[in-house]
Amino acid sequence: MIFTTPDGEQFNQKMANKLSLSGNLIILCGHFKGIDYRIREHLITKEISIGDYVLTGGELAAAVIADAIIRIIPGVISDEQSALSDSFQDNLLAAPVYTRPADYNGWKVPDVLLSGHEAKIKEWELQQSLERTRRLRPDLLNE
């Protein structure tokens, strides 16, 4: 049984991946000050925090945890490979995403993405992921 609490272990993608393999989960949400401590001592198997802040109740934290877990269960997302390339799956932020048109107000999609060369596109995405992670979340590279 999981309990959402600010003093729990910090929730992350690695934990979501592991919990997605756990089968049935129960997420218990406290309200205002939490729950009776005896429940925490005797029934709770994992305490999880979604960040260093306090909410009025654990319901929003439970929704965040549930969504992160559910979306990686096979069959939930139609393109399962897409979920595997999302941010944090390999301790990297995702590469930038571009859509159509290829040129909007002079803002162009990188040529490599229009090339159709799958290996070069994958290489570009990896380089972008590494660069973005180094710049925005260098802490992820140390994990």
Image: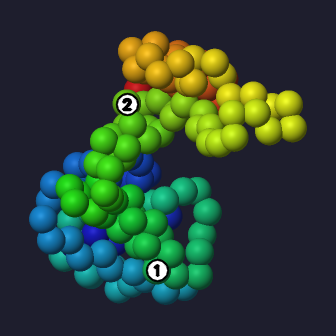
Q: Residue at x 41, y 26 (%)?
A: 143
Circle 2 is placed at which residue position?
Answer: 90
Residue 104 drawn above or below residue 74? above
Q: Amino acid at mark 1?
A: Glu
Looking at the image, how many numbered discs can be counted on the residues?
A: 2
Q: Name which residue lies at 47% across and 22% down.
A: 116
What's the amino acid at mark 2? Answer: Asp
Q: Is residue 18 above or below residue 23?
A: above
Q: Is residue 132 left or right of residue 142?
A: right
Closer to us: 92 or 101? 101
Residue 18 coordinates in the image, percent (x, y): 22, 49
Task: Locate residue 114, reporting x and y percent.
Answer: 57, 24
Provide residue 58's location: percent of width, then percent of height.
47, 77
The residue under label 1 is 59
Q: In the figure, residue 34 lies in which quadrant?
A: bottom left
Closer to the eye: label 2 or 1: 2
**Colouring used for the render:** rainbow
Quadrant of the image containing the N terminus: bottom left
**SS at mark 1 in the image:** helix
